[in-house]
Amino acid sequence: MRIRRPEPHTLAGAYALDALDAPDRARFERHAARCQECTGEVASLREATARLAGAAAAPPPAALKEALRAETARTRQLPPLTRDSPATGRTRPRPGARRLALALGGAAAVAAVTVWVTASLGPPAGQPSASQEIAAVLTAPDAVKLTAQVRTGGTATIVMSPHDGMLVFAAAGLRRLSAAQHYELWLIGPGRDRPAGRLPLPSHGMTGPVVASGLRSGDRLGLTVEPATGTGRPTTPMILELTL
Amino acid sequence: MSPPRSPWTGTPPGTDHADLAALLARVAVGDQAAFDAMYDRVAAPVFGTVRNVVRDPGLTEEVTQEVFVEVWRAASRFDASKGSPMAWVATIAHRRAVDRVRSEQRSADRDRRAASPMIAYDEVAETVADNLDRERVRRCLGTLTDLQREAVTLAYYGGYTYREVAGLLGVPAGTVSTRMRDGLIRLRDCLGAGR
């Protein structure tokens, strides 16, 4: 599969959202260093992302402020810059950063805004669209991302929400199948293996996404190649098997 | 510290850019009281943003603490001519959160995230002070196309890269990066957050 690289300038939004991985980020920053327009655009887009942060506001535990007093008291401050350089904190996290020993336990609430944002902006009534279902899983507070190699080639990415009993499956670079075959997902638990969805044909090297629901605790996820006529149970060896 | 080139618009309730910038200038010279006052202003957006991305409560506190130590350390590097103080702090917070999540994922430390407790949504909603601002952001997000909105919110609140968003939504990566930019521009203009 060949990945087309977008023009650096079109990455300004993804950069402002911190949605670039390390190589893409470095590439954009090299470009932006020579592109005043890009720097200005990123700065203005960050005013928008700061508002997204504002909308996600949630009060931190009170003990955090106290703990910070002790931290700042022993942290040396940087002198002002004397030459032009990036204004944002680009320094690496210090290794072995101290873990806060706050007794919060289960009282701490977890992210809600994501669910609120994606859930409440949907269409006024009716079935959620597939992309809304996907978005709901991806932003579920308990979402976990897994990646795994498919034995016959390709990489699978799974995001699941155990609470919702749903997962989103997508894969890249899967081996091409004949027209008489397809890839099929299975949920493997106590009792029968349950079919969890047939993968669509690849597009741009990507297969999926497929949403599977009805996940139960202790299930494993499997992938097999099956005849296109359908089987109802796996008839070939698993080419991917994951404990969820 | 030079003043902004033009007046700020769309200031969220309870946040005054000039005040916050003045506090940061005092933080830069080691003023602990200014740091406390600055913390009171921005702690909720920082904590909420980090928590959205990181999810694990213990890790959220750890990353939030790192963010504020970084703000303390680098306060002298804040430049009001390049953006608002809130954007500067939010950028440090969000980036620190996604970087941490991505490095955790690389070390295959999935159990910790999976162990996040479930939430009482209503409880969270009630404790949020800036309801008006939230309402406005929500309304402006509603002006985006579905794909723009999903791309922007998955990246910002979910901490996904644009390639991950592309894979998971089944859309080419180039399309996602374009929609992220278009969506943010539209959001910025709707919020009057640009300059």
Image (cartoon, coloured by chain):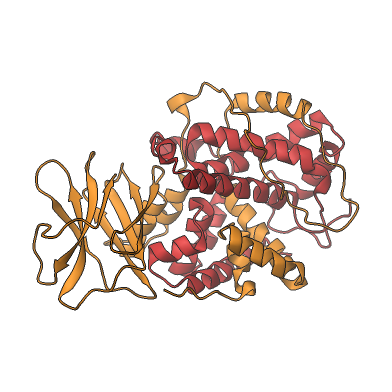
Name the outermost residue toward the top: A103
Q: Is A192 or B168 nearer to us in this picture? A: A192
Determine the residue positioned at 9% across, 60% down: A232
Query: Is residue B150 visible to us here?
Result: no
x%, y% of residue B112?
Answer: 43, 36
x%, y% of residue A111?
Answer: 47, 42
Compared to residue A133, the image places residue A115 above or below, namely above
Determine the residue positioned at 52% across, 21% down: A103
Tell me the quarter of the picture where residue A14 sits.
bottom right
Q: Is A175 or A107 nearer to us in this picture? A: A175
The shade of chain B is: red
Tell me the quarter of the picture where residue B178 sits.
bottom right
Determine the residue positioned at 54% across, 62% down: B140
x%, y% of residue A43?
Answer: 71, 61
Tell me the quarter of the picture where residue A129 sits.
bottom left
The number of callouts visible is 0
Query: Is residue B170 visible to us here?
Result: yes
x%, y% of residue B177?
Answer: 54, 69
Looking at the figure, which quarter contains the C terminus of chain B? bottom right
The shade of chain A is: orange
Compared to residue B39, the image places residue B81 above or below, namely below
